[in-house]
Image (tube, helix red, strand yellow):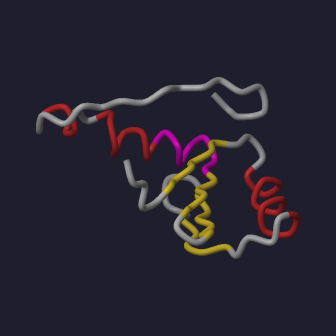
Amino acid sequence: MVVNSFRVALTVVDFDRAVAFYRDGLGLDPGYLWTENGRGQLFGAGEASLEIFDPDYAANVDQIEAGNGSVVKFGLPLKCRIFKWPWIAH
């Protein structure tokens, strides 16, 4: 299997602190900032992307990507593993 891109999306309790960590601490360049229905920040890292969401924006993304049933309606399998980490908002 060849992986052409890698996407990680994290929902965080303290959005500003998380963005500062990845921007200032790890030196990732911030890309697009979403501000409608919450906040989300995109970071690019070569063939990978990191998305930081506040809980409101994460709920909006969940509704768009899976909650309306469009993925299943078109016969696409929805496979994911949900991990509950103590430092990430649930």
33 to 64, vertically: above or below: below
Give the x, y percent position of residue 34: 53, 65
Q: Is residue 23 above or below residue 80?
A: below
Percent of width and height locating residue 83: 60, 25
Q: Residue at x 78, y 53 (%)?
A: 18
For the C terminus, give its image quadrant.
top right
Q: From what the image shows, is residue 64 above or below residue 40? A: above
Side of 21 where 12 appears, left or right: left
Is residue 56 rendered magenta in the image?
Answer: yes
Closer-to-camera residue (26/59)? 26
Asked if the magenta segment contains residue 84, the reply would be no
Where on the picture, by quarter, is residue 71? top left
Compared across the picture, whether 75 is left or right of 13 comes to left
Indicate left or right for 54 with 23 as reference.
left
In the image: residue 11, left or right of residue 23: left
Q: Residue at x 51, y 53 (%)?
A: 7
Q: Residue at x 26, y 36 (%)?
A: 68
In terms of depth relative to the viewer, which is nearer, 37 or 14?
Answer: 14
Residue 12, image x and y in percent?
Answer: 70, 43
Q: Residue at x 63, y 54 (%)?
A: 52
**Residue 13 % position (x, y):** 73, 40
Q: How many marks?
A: 0
- Residue placed farthest to the right in the image? 25
When asked about the image quadrant of residue 73, the answer is: top left
Q: Furthest residue to the left?
A: 74
How would you classify the magenta stretch by its main secondary structure?
A: helix
- Magenta residues (range): 53-59
Which residue is at the far front?
1
